[in-house]
Image (spheres, helix red, strand yellow):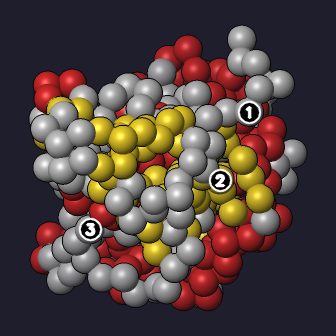
Amino acid sequence: MKNTSVNSRVVLEVDLGTLERNFRKIAEGVAPLGVVAVLKADAYGLGMGPIARRLGAAGAAGIATAELAEALAAQAATGGRVPVGILGSLLPDEIAPAVRAGIRIPLSDMAEARAVSAAATRLKRTAVCHVALDTGMSRIGVRLDEAEALVPRFAALPGVRLEGLYSHFPTANVPGDPATAAQVRAVKALARRLAARGIRFAALHVANSDGINNVPASCRAPFTHVRAGINLHGSFDPVGNRRLRLEPVFSLKARLAQVRRVKAGSTIGYGRTWTAPRDMLVGTVAAGYADGLPLALSNRGSILVGGELCPVVGRICMDFTTVDLAQVPDARAGDECVCLGRQGAREIGIDEWATLKGTHPYEVLCAIGSRVRRVHVG
């Protein structure tokens, strides 16, 4: 059990005011389309409850999650006042609880649709469903070449109401990608053909955060909504446009556990990957890879101490990281360190970590450890 009477060594500080400003900038940029907030994986590790409440109050058109437990948490956080849906899929034993709770349910095939219909009929409920359409991701969803025949069969099932149709882009981070443009055209054409058969959707959406920045056609009618995930945090994919001026909403803060002098020739850390070129002052930061600092920062990254960028020396450990304090000779144990975020005039962005790790900001953010205390301000 976590001892809440002791201050955490590492804190992830989330500014809800900045989060709301980002949301409003996105909403203005895609108006009149509604913005669905994607809050998978505990809002990407930032904390579902406070994030969902703030965005719900700010006017989010809905909340999207990856699985049922997340959806129920979002629903509880917003008091049921904001529609909550699942973008992924439901496992068989999750169908009835999702119907009972009124969660928006994804439909990917006929067997799944029949199971949803059976649960809804048994519970005397109407299952509100969104058809997941596979237009090139090949992950989940009704195949595009089968959709025109299958969707009317979904609509005819008892206890099922089709509210939405959606698809997902694999390469929306690449501006002008012809495959993405073809996906947009395919969804629009299918929606037109289904409308001609009397099946119309109140929600039609394909744009994710990358789509918002790189695929203008996905943010206009006939589409009704966009899905904003990483952009809400002020982060972007390393590739692609950054159409919106958004701000980072989080800072990862730790403290110096020790300050010490080492002699020239001393090696630091596991594997002895770094050797002191001179007598020097180093600091041991009380944060390591268990807290989310990527091993790729070893001997390459920096941490802010006293407003200065202090290079990481040696390999990052599970619980500690050593930095060169040459620029901060007055540093003392207990001083605040900023691993991600701003301190003074300098800033370390999550994009820098993603680049060093050879990944994207999503993975970096989701890797911040469970022992890191989440603090919501603003």
Question: As shown in the figure, which amino acid type bears the numbered disc 3?
Answer: Pro
Q: Nearer the viewer, residue 345 or 277?
A: 277
Q: Is residue 26 above or below residue 173?
A: below
Q: Image quadrant of residue 235?
A: bottom left
Q: Secondary structure at mark 2?
A: strand
On the picture, is 162 further left or further right than 97?
left
Q: Is residue 195 visible?
A: no
Question: As shown in the figure, which amino acid type bears the numbered disc 2?
Answer: Glu
Task: Give the residue at mark 1.
Answer: 7
Which mark lies nearer to you, 1 or 2? 1
Q: Is residue 156 above or below residue 123?
A: below
**Whole-percent x and y of residue 138?**
21, 44
Q: Residue at x 65, y 67 (%)?
A: 19
Q: Nearer the viewer, residue 112 or 159?
A: 112
Quadrant in which the C terminus appears: bottom right
Asked whether disc 1 touches disc 3, contact meaning CB atoms under 8 Å apart, the reply is no
**Whole-percent x and y of residue 105?**
57, 40
- The mark found on residue 238 in the picture is 3
Q: Residue at x 42, y 77 (%)?
A: 212
Which mark lies nearer to you, 1 or 3? 1
Task: Give the residue at mark 2.
Answer: 13
Q: Residue at x 59, y 65 (%)?
A: 249
Q: Secondary structure at mark 3?
A: loop
